[in-house]
Image (cartoon, helix red, strand yellow):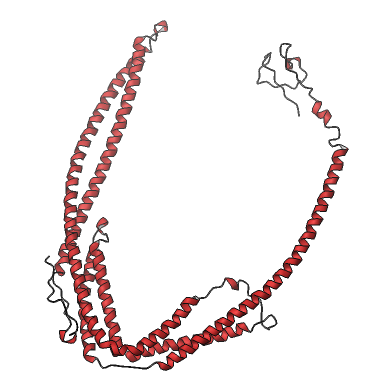
Amino acid sequence: PAVYYRTVHTEPIQSLNISTVQPFSSTNYFNNIDSSKVPPIFLSARQALYTRYAPKDWHNAQLTNYLASDKICAASARLRSDAIGLAHEKDEQAFKNNFESSRHIAEIINDIEYWESELEKTKDNMKRKIDDVEFIQREVKRLLSETEKPLRIVQENLYEREKRQGIDLVRDNVERELIREVDTIELSQQKLRQMLERLGFQNALNFAGLHELERDVQDKSRARVLDSAAHNIQTTSSGIKFYEGIEYVDNTISVPESWTRYTQENIRRAVAGISQSDELLSATNQLMATIYDDIWSQWNHVNTSLENRLQEEKVAKNKIQSHLEKIRHEIVDVEQTIEFLKKTIADQEAFLQVAQTRLETRNRRPNVEACRDSAMLRLIQEVHDLHAAIADLYGKLRQEENALQLLLRTQSTLEQDLEIKNNSLSIDSEKVMSIRRTFIMGAPEKSLVTSVSFSQPHDLITV
């Protein structure tokens, strides 16, 4: 391919955008006043014809290869020695690990045999005791039925309060107290049902405890057989094979502590079931008295919280109405300001049209009369000033419009919040408080709980 050259700037005889294929043209050399020296053109090409490496380089390269070979051989020898040592070490470690695993399995087998023996003793000592407490049992059933009345009311209260809207759908103190009341009643019902089970179905409870003991014994017997089989497996045993990834399979559901605690709990429940019958009468009397007082006390706590919440909602409603009135007045003022700014911008644009028209008219002056005189300079300055003024006014107009939009959104939010507050007041006062003015749960018979004193009469909080 042709080599292209361009003329230098010292003698621009030809245009710089014209290429030439004449490398020896006299126009391509610097003149005498330029002290730069141009190197020969074909010097690099001539140098490429000679050898690039010296004999010393060749010998050094060979020596480097020899040294590298020696180092690699030495490293390989060390690696072989380390590999043999590692193999012996891992072999010893494998024997040690196998011994430790066998020892741990043997310990587990001993633990299983111990607890299996304890479970068998407890199972043999399980006895059935039943006390004839039919009168107390009927009273417990009646009290259990009475708890359904306040439970239905509090559930209806929670259902009605779910109809609150927006931000008022809050977990306030009333809701927390209502939920606590539900928990109190349900916990009381649970205790009463448990007491009924203890009174009427002691045999069933004992049988359930016995069933748990038998199942625990059966599981431990199966586990003991499997652990014994695992303990007897050796490297010479038949049937051993690889199970890839078995070490990552974890189907355990307990740890040693919870495993022991599970059996202890089964034994404890069985022993407790044997001695429960002697304490049923006094426990039943105390339970009924406590349940009645707890439910009545929580009922009053809910009423107090509900009254306080009604006051808060009324105060919030009044504040919203006050702020809404201020917002509406401010919206009117901002709208008037926006109209004033638009009129001012229109006036400024009229002045701008005048100034620009004057400039355009004076630009048609002929020849030397087109003078950049003081009038023209003043008109130009006037145009710049008007542009700046209009830009400032438009910026302020956008700010006012943004403020108006924000005010309108705030107004909408407050109006919506006011509707929400009215809805909440209606729910809490008309649908919740109206059905909580009277406590409708009957107290247990005093003759049955002579050892317990009720704090009657229960005066309801004045609402």
Q: Is residue 289 above or below residue 56?
A: below
Q: Depth check: give the residue in front, 415 or 122.
A: 122
Quadrant of the rendering where the N terminus is positioned: top right
Q: Depth check: give the residue in front, 460 or 153.
A: 460
Q: In this view, does 349 lie above or below 401?
A: above
Q: Depth check: give the residue in front, 245 or 339.
A: 245
Residue 4 screen position, x and y as percent: 72, 24
**Residue at point 29% right, 79% down?**
190
Residue 192 shows in this picture? yes
Q: Which residue is most to the right?
A: 55
**Residue at point 27% right, 75% down?**
186
Q: In this view, does 401 lie above or below 352?
A: below
Rendering quarter of residue 6 = top right
Residue 460 in the figure: left or right of residue 269: left
Residue 55 in the figure: left or right of residue 96: right
Q: Which residue is most to the top?
A: 368
Q: Depth check: give the residue in front, 188 or 283.
A: 283
Residue 375 screen position, x and y as percent: 34, 11
